[in-house]
Amino acid sequence: MEMVRVFDRSVKTIKNYWGSFIILKGINNINAAWEEVSVNYSNGVWRHLLPYFMHDFTGFEPVENTVEVISRLAQEVGLDEVTAESVTEMLYSHGQQISNEDLEEVAKEMSQQKEEDKKKMKSLLKNV
């Protein structure tokens, strides 16, 4: 690709061109070539090579659309406390690190929940 441009602008010979060719030029040529390969073309090639693994995936929807869908579905099933803001907050919270105190609190809550579940199960079994 670069070679074609060089010969279009100068009277360089192929021997002179390859004599001045360095690894960096090769890397830049590869980069320029990959930038011209479209996602659709790449997917088409992979679809022929590994059809089992290829689907018609064209990209992710914007997060805003997903948030709207999640909050609408939650409202439909009766989860009125779920809002678009709470969904957005939950999605972005996954990128934050959790502190040791928070981990301990979650572990304590899970332990309490297990105890409550055991008590409920025992009372259900007594009634059977």
Image (cartoon, helix red, strand yellow):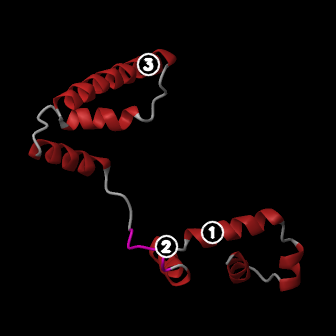
Mark 2 and mark 3 lie on one chain; the one further toward the N terminus is 2
Tell whether label 2 touches label 1 (CB within 8 Å): no
Quadrant for residue 95, please give it.
top left
Q: Nearer the viewer, residue 5 or 9?
A: 5
Amino acid carrying mark 3 in the image: Asp
Instruction: State how far apart marks 2 and 3 are (Cα).
Output: 39 Å
Mark 1 and mark 2 lie on one chain; the one further toward the N terminus is 1
> Is the residue marked by circle 1 packed among few (<14), some (14-19), or many (20+) residues within 10 Å?
few
Q: Nearer the viewer, residue 116 or 85?
A: 116
**Side (left or right) of 123 relative to 76:** right
Mark 1 and mark 3 lie on one chain; the one further toward the N terminus is 1
> Is the residue marked by circle 3 packed among few (<14), some (14-19), or many (20+) residues within 10 Å?
few
Q: Is residue 125 above or below residue 54?
A: above
Residue that label 1 marks: 32
The residue under the point 18% across, 43% down is: 71
Q: Magenta segment range? A: 51-57
Return the mark for residue 53: 2
The residue under the point 62% across, 73% down is: 33
Residue 53: say if magenta: yes
The residue under the point 16% across, 29% down is: 127
Return the mark for residue 102: 3
Residue 84, given in percent of the width and then of the height, sits at 20, 38
Amino acid carrying mark 2 in the image: Phe
Res 13 seen here: no
**Tag nearer the camera, 1 or 2:** 2
Determine whether the residue tagged by mark 2 lies in a helix, strand or loop. loop
Determine whether the residue tagged by mark 3 lies in a helix, strand or loop. helix
Quadrant for residue 1, please give it.
bottom right
The residue under the point 68% across, 70% down is: 30
Q: Is residue 35 above or below residue 67?
A: below
